Amino acid sequence: METCLKMQGNKADMGTLAWGRRQGEFSKGRLTKAEKLKVLSNLGRMGMLEALDVLKGRLGLINAYGTDLEGLQPPETALVRDAIDFADEVQNLDLMRHSWRTYYFGMLLGGFQKLTVDREILFCAAILHDVGLAFGRSSEPRDCCFVVHGAERCQHHLIGKGHDRAKVHRIADAIGLHLNGYVSERTYGAEAHLLSRGAMCDVFGMGRRRVAPEVRKDITTRHPKGNLADALEIWPRHHLPGTRADFLIRFEASRK
């Protein structure tokens, strides 16, 4: 019950399904000024956490977490099977590998933090978190925030397969939230938090020092990075202006 309450948060919180369905000037995932400041604040928080990890690493104070990847496999449930079948059907190889790495990094960072994780929810969210960029999409990134579209696409597909609406809603909300820069475990639950952390770890390397080097190597050996920038369509002026993806790409470009 506690996790379900966490995932509810404010029904219109940035990134949630309800937020993605807003109408008017800030529809389709466009950010308000306050939301842009929130994303900047979240990125600042992630930057401070990373700087602290660097310092701890230099002082030998960080106890990196490692375990056998075989012990991190998702449960064999109908929901997991349908999620991975959908991902296999619509995602290219680089996107699929990124999704697997995101899941493993999320699980490992959860182990580092000693969090209790629902593997079914985290895996389904991770394997489908970029489905808004996959084949067969009905909306292009220049027309709508791809994460908003992906969360809706995921929800529609999994509910269409007859899965529990509450579970699917948690998965879709986690997908919608993951581009916020930082997602609170206390507010939204461990799975949404770790999906965001796992994706940030894979794309930007944030949190990698918390994962044992040999385990990181095992992950990238099983699921090589390939051309991640093209898989995620990280291209200038490709995404709808005012969305989180566009804002983050511009922000990163301004720092170079």
Image (cartoon, rainbow, N blue to C red):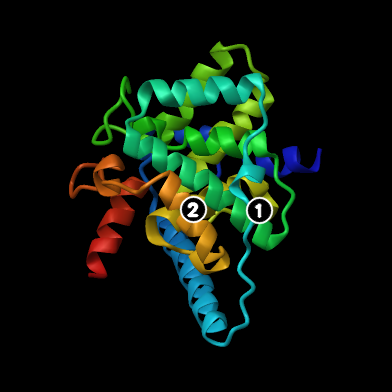
> Closer to the observer: label 2 or label 1?
2
| Residue 146, image x, y percentages | 35, 36
Give the spatial CA distance, label 2 vs label 1.
27 Å
Q: Secondary structure at mark 2?
A: helix
Q: Earlier in the sequence, mark 2 or mark 1?
A: 1
In the rendered view, would you say 212 is above or below 163? Answer: below
Residue hosting label 1: 185
Quarter of the figure that contains the C terminus: bottom left
Circle count: 2
Q: Secondary structure at mark 1?
A: helix
Residue at left 50%, top 18%?
156
Please, what is the three-letter code of the amino acid marked with disc 2? Asp
Q: Residue furthest bottom?
A: 59
- Residue 60 lies in what quarter of the image? bottom right
| Residue 196, image x, y percentages | 51, 50
Residue hosting label 2: 218
In the rendered view, would you say 88 is above or below 193? Answer: above
Q: Is residue 242 at least partly visible in the picture? A: no
Q: Is residue 51 at least partly visible in the picture? A: yes
Whether residue 123 sits left or right of residue 227 in the image: it is right
In the rendered view, would you say 162 is above or below 194? Answer: above
Residue at left 54%, top 44%?
103
| Residue 178, image x, y percentages | 49, 46
Whether residue 114 sits left or right of residue 52 in the image: it is right
Residue at left 33%, top 55%?
248
